[in-house]
Image (cartoon, helix red, strand yellow):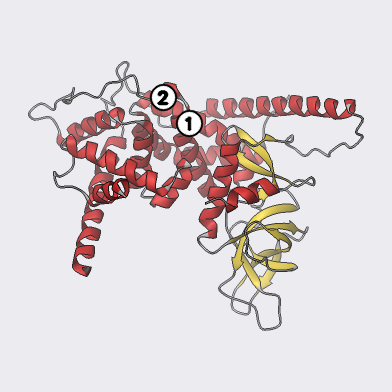
């Protein structure tokens, strides 16, 4: 049986060629590993292909794939990092002379791996993709208040690892205010 | 007070930019990607095998849906019903889960907040008709509003809808849930008002009043009334 889908195949292939690197970057942040990112992106892309006719446009396809990645992350326990115990100190301490960018990359990835999936997703969507709280809430299927408090906790974790300045950030203040209210 | 608000806004902007830069750095590939075992993969795109897997995945899903539909039809036949639906390219979707309906409602709500109305409309065959408001030319289609999914009153009767971005982008169905709002530029007085259509979402509606929603595990079907009710829940 010939399973080719001419219009769908071409559009999908073009979409993957253009957007795969970008999706993979998001995948790295969501999973913390290269192989985990590839698995997550490809699983999401399979679902995107199946829904291609309904999605209709390449711009919508990227958002659809990203949303699917985030939801797969929350759904699939194998992709959670619950098996890892957050360490008090960074396991990979940059050595003198170590390139600063690489040190930061390693530290941020370690931090991401230690966060619960929900906080990680909020951090990635809110700050990396720069979506609004409402948009993040829509993608995650939670309330904007939940987004706000997860963002505040994630930022606190960043600060605790010395990756942000030690002063309380505006988002944290809002998140704390939201929790107190 | 204004100064304090300005300072907080400035802090937030600095925080956001700082965090964005940290995440951007962490998102880039490197030789030490954090994987515990194995060298990093060099290939940057998945290659043709992904398309093969995707086709296989679609085929399996269709087979599963067809099997489900066949079972449902068998049950209907057993019950003595003679009505048989017409099938399109893709088989009828399975019932949508509660979370899927809630997500669809949340998606629609986001657009409602931007001034769009979710309407159940019938779209004619004239999906791609030239439209001209005197200053701008483009393509659009005619639709008939059947009902609104929100409490507000729907625009009545026949609608002229601008669809400049993707004239063929609507789902292949004559009945749809579309997001419409009055266009900024209107035709000359006396002519039927123009509406803008939100690029997404657009949900097909079947003859039996089921709306097809995008769910995580593929399409899901829900009664229009169920979606309307979910939309009303804030």
Q: Is A20 drawn above or below residue B208 in the view shown? A: above
Contact check, label 2 and label 1, Cβ < 8 Å: yes
Q: Is B29 drawn above or below residue B128 in the view shown? A: above
| Front-most of residues B223 and A139 | B223
| Front-most of residues A65 and B76 | B76
Question: Label 1's element?
Answer: helix
**Quadrant in the picture for residue A110:** top left
**Quadrant in the picture for residue A114:** top left
Give the numbered dot on residue A72: 1
| Front-most of residues A136 and B163 | A136
Residue drawn at x 23%, y 40% as measured from the top left: A156
**Quadrant in the picture for residue A93:** top left
Q: CA distance from mark 2 to mark 1?
A: 8 Å
For residue B194, side relative to residue B17 (left or right):
right
Give the numbered dot on residue B203: none
Chain ID, mark 2? A
For residue A108, side relative to residue B153 (left or right):
left
Q: Residue furthest bottom?
A: B189
Residue B3: % across, % down = 19, 67
Q: Earlier in the sequence, mark 2 or mark 1?
A: 1
Residue drawn at x 75%, y 37% as measured from the top left: B89
Residue drawn at x 19%, y 35% as measured from the top left: A104
């Amino acid at each position: 049986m010939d399973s080719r889908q001419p219009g769908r195949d071409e559009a999908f292939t073009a979409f993957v060629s253009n957007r795969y690197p970008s999706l993979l970057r998001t995948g790295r942040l969501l999973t913390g590993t290269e192989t985990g990112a590839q698995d997550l992106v490809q699983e999401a892309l399979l679902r995107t292909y199946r829904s291609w006719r309904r999605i209709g446009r390449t711009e919508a396809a990227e958002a659809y794939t990203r949303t699917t990645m985030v939801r797969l992350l929350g759904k699939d326990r194998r992709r959670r990092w619950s098996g890892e115990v957050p360490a008090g100190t960074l396991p990979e301490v940059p050595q003198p002379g170590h390139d600063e960018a690489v040190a930061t990359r390693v530290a941020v990835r370690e931090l991401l791996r230690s966060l619960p999936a929900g906080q990680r997703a909020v951090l990635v969507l809110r700050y990396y993709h720069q979506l609004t709280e409402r948009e993040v809430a829509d993608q995650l299927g939670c309330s904007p208040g939940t987004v706000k408090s997860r963002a505040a906790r994630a930022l606190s974790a960043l600060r605790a690892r010395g990756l942000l300045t030690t002063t309380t950030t505006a988002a944290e203040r809002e998140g704390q205010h939201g929790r107190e209210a | 007070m204004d100064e304090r608000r300005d300072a907080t806004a400035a802090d937030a902007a600095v925080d956001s930019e700082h965090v964005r830069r940290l995440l951007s750095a962490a998102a880039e590939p490197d030789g030490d990607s954090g994987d515990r075992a194995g060298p990093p993969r060099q290939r940057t795109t998945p290659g043709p095998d992904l398309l093969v897997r995707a086709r296989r995945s679609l085929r399996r899903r269709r087979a599963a849906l067809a099997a489900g539909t066949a079972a449902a039809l068998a049950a209907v036949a057993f019950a003595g019903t003679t009505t048989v639906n017409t099938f399109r390219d893709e088989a009828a979707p399975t019932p949508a889960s509660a979370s899927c309906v809630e997500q669809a409602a949340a998606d629609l709500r986001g657009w409602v907040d931007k001034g769009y109305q979710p309407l159940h409309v019938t779209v004619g065959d004239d999906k791609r008709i030239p439209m001209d408001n005197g200053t701008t030319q483009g393509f659009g289609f005619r639709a008939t509003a059947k009902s609104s999914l929100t409490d507000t009153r729907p625009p009545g009767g026949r609608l002229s809808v601008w669809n400049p971005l993707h004239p063929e982008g609507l789902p292949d169905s004559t009945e749809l849930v579309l997001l419409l709002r009055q266009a900024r530029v209107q035709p000359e007085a006396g002519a039927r008002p123009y509406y803008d259509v939100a690029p997404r979402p657009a949900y097909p509606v079947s003859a039996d009043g089921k709306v097809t929603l995008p769910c995580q595990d593929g399409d899901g079907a829900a009664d229009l009334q169920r979606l309307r009710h979910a939309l009303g829940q804030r």
